[in-house]
Amino acid sequence: MSTSTRWTVAVLVVVAGLIVALALQLREPSSHQPAPGTARSAGSGGSGAPAELRAAAGLPPCPAGASAGPTALHGISVQCAADGYNVDVARVVAGQAVVLNLWAYWCVPCRTELPAMAEYQKRAGPAVTVIAVHEDDNEVAALQLLTDLGVRLPTLQDGGRRVAAALHVPNVMPATVLLRADGSVAATLPQAFASADEIAAAVDQKLGVPQ
């Protein structure tokens, strides 16, 4: 065997070894497992915005109800902005009265409404859950705005507007959908709110929130 042939064989052996090692590494399961009590989909993984930006936003995890949730939202999976993992939207809203606030980072009225929604959540307590739904692909801008505003609500990243389409929400921004605990839609409110008092006046009676 000539010297050149021996070198060719050696190179091929090294390349084959690297391919095998890479294949084994790709087959290893991730050590990052979802925390219990969240509505993450099987096989999902954190992605999108930088981890340090998510940490700075300090958003709470997306809830997970015990039931299957509203039929209209079955099969819809989006990212939970708290960690970047996919969640089953129907399970996120299942079994509770929910205020879904649909917004986008570029929406001027949303900058006033988001803090009002956060204040309303504090007042309402466990009787209702306010969930923000960001309807633009730019998740980084959304997290930055929430950080700047100091708003810490469970947030879904839905750049494809799948939630709005499933619930037949008009194409306006912001908009709010009220879901009863049984998953039915109590009201769709395509309007902006300027204060927690305005939100309470529009929401509490429809969702049976104690006064």
Image (tube, helix red, strand yellow):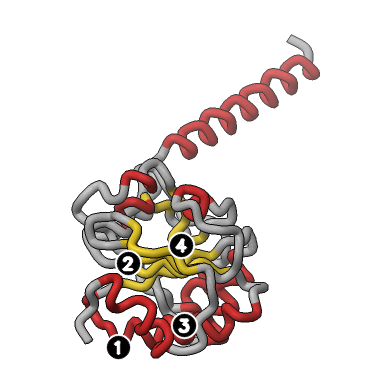
* Alpha carbon distance from label 1 to label 3: 15 Å
3D distance between C-alphas at marks 1 and 2: 14 Å
Q: Amino acid at mark 3?
A: Val
* Residue at 57%, 78% in the rendered image: 110
Q: Which mark is residue 151?
A: 3
Task: Describe residue 205's horizontal placement relative to residue 9 as left or right.
Answer: left
Task: Estimate the spatial distance between the alpha carbons at disc 3 and disc 2, rounded to whole Å.
Answer: 17 Å
- Please give the name of the residue rendered at 46% of the width and 48% of the height, measured from the top-left corner: 166
Badge 4 element: strand
Q: Earlier in the sequence, mark 3 or mark 2?
A: 2
Mark nearest the camera among 1 and 4 is 1
For marks 3 and 4 on the same chain, the one whose residue lies earlier in the sequence? 3
Expressed as whole percent of the image width and height from the top left, the position of residue 14 reads: 63, 29
Q: Is residue 171 left or right of residue 93?
A: right
Asked if the residue under mark 3 is in contact with the one under mark 1, i.e. CB atoms within 8 Å, the reply is no
Residue topped by disc 4:
156
Count residues near mark 3 (Cα–Cα under 10 Å), then give few for <14, some for 14-19, many for 20+: some
From the top left corner, tell me how far across and down residue 63 is, in percent.
Answer: 30, 63
Q: Amino acid at mark 1?
A: Arg
Indicate which disc, 1 or 3, sits on the residue closer to the N terminus. 1
Res. 129 in view = yes
Which quarter of the rendering shows the C terminus? Answer: bottom left
Q: Earlier in the sequence, mark 1 or mark 2?
A: 2
Task: Please state which amino acid type lies under the numbered disc 2.
Answer: Val
Q: Nearer the viewer, residue 42 or 154?
A: 154
Dot label at residue 123: 1
Give the mark toward the camera: 1 or 3.
Answer: 1
Q: Secondary structure at mark 2?
A: strand
Q: Position of residue 154 (x, y in %)?
A: 39, 70
Task: Tell me the quadrant of the picture where the N terminus can be found.
Answer: top right
